[in-house]
Image: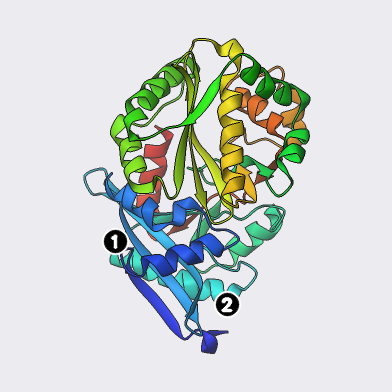
Amino acid sequence: MLDKLLELGEQPYSADDAEWDAFVAAHPQGSILQTTNWARLKNRFNWSAQRVWLKQDGKLVAGAQILFRSAALGLLKIGYIPHGPLVDWQDEEQVAVLFNQIDMACYENRAGLVKMEPLLWQDEMPPEQWAAFCQRQETMMLTDTDTIQPPRTMISDLRPSLDDILANMKSKTRYNIRLAAKKEVTVRQGTAVDLPLFNQLMTITGQRDGFGVHVPVYYKAFWEIFAPEQAAMFIAEFEERPLAAIIVSAVGNKAVYLYGASSNEERQRMPTYAVQWAAIQWAKERGCTEYDLWGIPDAPEDELEANFTERSDDLWGVYRFKRGFGGQSKRTVGAVDRIYNKRVHKLYQWRRSR
């Protein structure tokens, strides 16, 4: 394998953006979190980015976009690879070459550790196989570390017809989608003008459901960078009053529900179901074959099904809503820390625990 890798790369993210994004879009583990635009977004919020990659016969075959950030007065500097690296995990020689590139990038950026969260599903690499793989790596690697991205999600198959997609949903969800239309809820696509409205709904939702939201400038930056080519906003209204809004993205054949919010008014009109159905139709029209509902409780499927009617803490209420859209529960292999400095890793763990 090594003699066929004609080119190794390590460079700032700004070079060869189109080639990189095409690689990400086509890769089976590709994600919006590995795109050039995601690096640009994070660059506005005190992250820097660098790519490493491997080419074979002039074509990208593996790579990683690494985000770097300093904290604790510069004492803590970490690398982070969200939904990456993008590599054939069964080809350990290819992995070793790419990891060497990652190590060099982290060394040059003086990072004490790099956290990886590959979009690699457990049904592709079972936990015991993943743990054994990590143990074989030369640099210290820890599995089962804290995750930043939700490791478990629901993914709906968009390949069937819209009628069949609707038929595959839970009966209550189909009912609520139709009820929203019957109760005169309309859905329109939002624009930059609607960002203050979106931020207002996010604030209401965060206060009601007890979770943190980004500052308004974050959603503004996201919209400026991703819309309209890679993102869309959908707003559900009744009598021109906004009731719910979501932002979704599409990269390659994958659509992802990223941000969602709703008001405390007219909830009986089921506006959150209406915006999701609009987003699913939008994604299918773009040629996406899957719709990722992005984040449910990290529990086995039998536990989820046994408890979702009783529990409402954490993401359990979210699961009750998302399961209705007929998707499949999937879990990634989780996060792994590649450690270069044990003291830095201990400081990182302490800060995360707080």
Residue 144 shows up from this direction: no
Seen from the viewer's position, the closer of residues 104 and 278 is 278
Q: Horizontal and vertical percent for residue 72?
A: 26, 43
Looking at the rendered structure, the secondary structure element under dot 1 is loop
Q: Residue at x 42, y 79 (%)?
A: 8
**Residue 55, relative to residue 190: is it above or below?**
below
Q: Residue lying at the far bottom in this picture: please name it.
A: 3
Q: Residue lying at the far left in this picture: please name it.
A: 73
Q: Is residue 354 left or right of residue 176?
A: left
Q: Is residue 27 left or right of residue 341?
A: right
Q: Horizontal and vertical percent for residue 28?
A: 60, 61
Check whether the beta carbons of the residues at disc 2 and disc 1 lie within 8 A of each other: no
Nearer the camera: disc 2 or disc 1: 2
Q: Which residue is mark 2?
A: 93
Q: How is the image coloured?
A: rainbow
Quadrant including the C terminus: top left
Quadrant including the N terminus: bottom right
Q: Horizontal and vertical percent for residue 131?
A: 64, 57
Amino acid at pointer 2: Glu
Which corner quadrant of the image does residue 179 belong to? top right
Q: Residue at x 41, y 61 (%)?
A: 65
Q: Name the N-terminal-most of marks 2 and 1.
A: 2
**Residue 123, relative to residue 180: is it above or below?**
below
Q: Horizontal and vertical percent for residue 32?
A: 47, 51
Mark 1 crowd level (few <14, some 14–19, many ≥20, 10 Å Cα): some
Looking at the rendered structure, the secondary structure element under dot 2 is helix
Seen from the viewer's position, the closer of residues 72 and 32 is 32
Seen from the viewer's position, the closer of residues 83 and 16 is 16
Q: Marks 2/1: CA distance?
A: 25 Å
Image disc number at residue 110:
1
**Residue 6, relative to residue 35: is it above or below?**
below
